[in-house]
């Protein structure tokens, strides 16, 4: 195993001892990706010792545990209809000045290789966090070394600014490929957006049942991107606020209410096909099998909410707090009856309640596959928790789904008094990659 | 169940239907605590309807699940030798201007009642999040309604400023009771402390295996404190970085190394008694059975660390990265041999390595019971992850333990190049409360 290399580049055929038969992705990291990791600290004459000793500890951990593992390659990217995991680390990246088309493609290739490895519980690169040459930085940062895959999914998206900058520049020669559905979101009434936590050329959604696994993935993707893209903003979340599978119980948001009862469930294949996946006839052919991700960081004014009467909270939501049943009666999954009359003559469900305004019947049948998370980012200077909902929704076309629904909510939702939208992003999420290719390859062909 | 009340105060004997035999704490929330929750929104003439429908859902959830539940009352507070849970929400509070001795005692009483309930998987107050009068705010905010206790522990502490403010004021008539061991921490070389995330009159450490449970607890304690104390700073953490029980595997910190191999384990009773618990002869008798908590928010310069050679990382730590064994040989739990010689004539373990400088043999036998967590607070404006270690250590006397150890580390630790201490706090953690009394009662008797 002792070898000399003329520089920091490791030969892609350099397999670790005892790992034959391992499903190594066909492509290794690009030379540039390796340099990004190695930085300036690697001199000449690497000596490969110690490799194989603990090369893929994480894989052993995974097979021993009962943690879920989802395939990375496929028709669709994972992390959309995948049963929502419990933890999130979401990151928006901006391309570095000077990155060109070839560089962007190389970055996506490198990210694909690393994502395919990490989602299977393997280190980000061939030389694990605790193996390989002692005089080179490890390919992986190591904090997930003993952890199972934790159901990790990594989902990549392209923001409008990737196609054309605010100043009109087409840095990557892809402006003409921008899908019509990837619109800039309009300003909604009440928006209090902060530029530093909005937008981004690229996004990566990392979901896992273990926050350390999700953080590890974003950290290593960020490291691989060094010099090519850097994190613009990022968000950690916990306690998924929506179910995406009928097998999952409905969780609660920080208002204390069940959230996502009426969410699209992955088992409803026809609804998913109709509302989530972009189709060939939709416009940009390279997006067929992809989806559009809208992210909104929604601060909740929880101290004020907490002082609100229970009955008023329920009126605002349109559901009861304990069971989550619509105020028109029944149980959690009963369809709300917006016409049911209360004793006082009004409707049992307030016309401006959240459940009514967001309901498909009020929105020409439009639905969203929501996949949001609760967040607490410490506290503000007044001692109030800086907390709320990091809303994520996937859809086939934001022009027909998120935008009209949010317009209606922003105008009239009783809940608005307790919400403040502070961050926003929209991203085209390409279809899944095939092995040997990379995420978003269709954009460049 | 229909009753009229003259104001927002609910009679303490008002038991919820079907809950007889339930181990209700003897004391309810103080009238002031109730007003804090109710705020100004509750008018006269409460009508108690709906109570009992879903009053204690969380208890049902707990008994159905297999989640750990730790007793709140006892000789010591829980959350110290308790096997370290996976998630943290730590909050430091400042007393409100005008809070007096009686008000502080009442706050501690209210916190005790709520903590005793929540740690057993029950709502913070008698009227659960989804029960009780519709025209009053629920006693509990609700987001943990369906969740098991998740091993929740709540650990309370008193900062130096509680005893005497920076301007010398003895607001609560307790200055003379300040334990000698509760010293203000000195400034250590390299400290880059930010005042807004340091100090605090009071602290609450919430640990759970579910972040939503920990967040729920801090939120409800903060709510109960309304008008009496407010959050000065708070910190979320994940992936405990130390084991406190021999039954736990050693986790990894964000340097990718195992952390806490040599930590005090709760099974070593004589070490715990010697190094963790304050004793009667130590000075302040009211602290016997308590401990002293030092918190340090330590930002890791992970981007620089990640570009460091594996061999250099291991030299800095003094252990190998994969197994966690000392570089003098053996396995993770082998004792390091600081005299073992390397081929080049130096010692195998660098004299300035972290493992050597922190070792009890270098510190007159002093040890710490560490209970820290990894944190990622998004990213900074340069796109670097704002990440590191939220260090928490319990000890019998910081003057003999944390302070001399940290002086040695701050002066010479090779790791310092990659660390920046940005937050700091020290708190006297009183012994556990007995049922019917409250945490810290001894301070006032």
Image (tube, coloured by chain):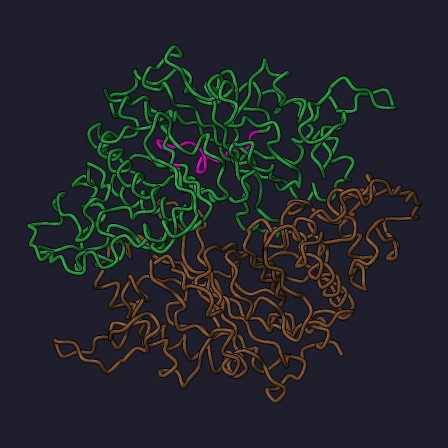
Chain colours: A brown, B green
Residue B230 or residue B129, whichever sits in front: B129
Residue A55, position as x, y percentages in the image: 77, 47
Q: Which residues are magenta?
A: B191-204
Give the farthest residue toward the top: B281
Residue A252, position as x, y percentages in the image: 38, 60
Residue B196 forms part of the magenta stretch:
yes
Question: Where on the picture, by quarter, is residue A381?
Answer: top left
Above or below, comparing residue A124 to residue A159 in the picture: above
Residue B75, position as x, y percentages in the image: 35, 25
In the rendered view of the protein, which quadrant contains the N terminus of chain A?
Answer: top right
Above or below, comparing residue B414 to residue B31 in the picture: above
Question: Where on the picture, by quarter, is residue B309?
Answer: top right
Q: Tell me what residue is drawn at x 52 percent, y 56 percent.
A: A87
Figure disc tally: 0
Residue A406 forms part of the magenta stretch:
no
In the rendered view of the protein, which quadrant contains the C terminus of chain A?
Answer: bottom right
Question: Where on the picture, by quarter, is residue A365?
Answer: bottom left
* Left/right of residue B243 with respect to residue B435 in the rendered view: right
- Residue A168 makes an appearance in the image: no
């Amino acid at each position: 195993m002792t070898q000399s290399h003329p520089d920091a580049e490791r030969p892609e055929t350099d397999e670790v001892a005892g790992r034959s038969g391992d499903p190594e992705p066909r492509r290794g990291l690009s030379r540039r990706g390796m340099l990004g990791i190695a930085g300036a600290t690697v001199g000449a004459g690497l000596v490969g010792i110690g490799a194989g000793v603990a090369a893929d500890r994480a894989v052993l951990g995974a097979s021993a545990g009962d943690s879920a593992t989802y395939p990375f390659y496929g028709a669709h990217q994972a992390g959309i209809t995948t049963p929502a995991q419990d933890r999130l680390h979401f990151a928006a990246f901006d391309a570095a000045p000077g990155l060109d088309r070839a560089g962007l493609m190389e970055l996506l290739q490198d990210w694909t290789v690393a994502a395919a490895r990490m989602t299977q519980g393997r280190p980000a690169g061939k030389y694990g966090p605790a193996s390989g040459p002692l005089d080179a930085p490890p390919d992986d940062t190591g904090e997930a070394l003993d952890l199972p895959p934790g159901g990790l999914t990594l989902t990549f998206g392209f923001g409008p600014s990737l196609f054309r900058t605010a100043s009109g520049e087409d840095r990557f020669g892809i402006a003409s490929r921008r899908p019509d559905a990837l619109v800039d979101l309009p300003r909604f009434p009440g928006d209090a957006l902060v530029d530093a936590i909005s937008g981004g050329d690229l996004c990566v959604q990392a979901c896992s049942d273990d926050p350390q696994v999700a953080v590890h993935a974003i950290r290593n993707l960020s490291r691989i991107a060094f010099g090519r893209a850097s994190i613009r903003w990022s968000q950690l979340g916990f306690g998924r606020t929506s179910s995406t599978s009928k097998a999952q119980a409905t969780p609660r948001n920080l208002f204390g209410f069940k959230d996502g009862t009426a969410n699209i469930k992955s088992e409803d294949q026809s609804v998913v096909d109709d509302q989530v996946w972009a189709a060939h006839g939709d416009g940009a052919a390279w997006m067929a099998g992809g989806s559009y991700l809208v992210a909104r960081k929604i601060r909740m004014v929880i101290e004020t909410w907490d002082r609100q009467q229970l009955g008023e909270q329920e009126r605002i939501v349109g559901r009861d707090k304990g069971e989550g049943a619509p105020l028109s009666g029944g149980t959690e999954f009963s369809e709300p009856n917006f016409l049911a009359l209360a004793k006082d003559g009004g409707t049992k469900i307030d016309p401006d309640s959240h459940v009514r305004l967001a309901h498909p019947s009020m929105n020409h049948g439009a639905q969203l596959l929501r996949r949001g998370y609760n967040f607490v980012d410490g506290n503000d200077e007044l001692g109030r928790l800086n907390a709320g909902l990091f809303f994520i929704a996937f859809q086939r076309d934001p022009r027909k789904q998120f935008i009209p629904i949010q317009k209606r909510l922003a105008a009239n939702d009783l809940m608005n008094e307790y919400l403040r939208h502070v961050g926003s992003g929209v991203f085209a999420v390409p279809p899944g990659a095939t092995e040997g290719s990379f995420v978003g390859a269709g954009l460049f062909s």
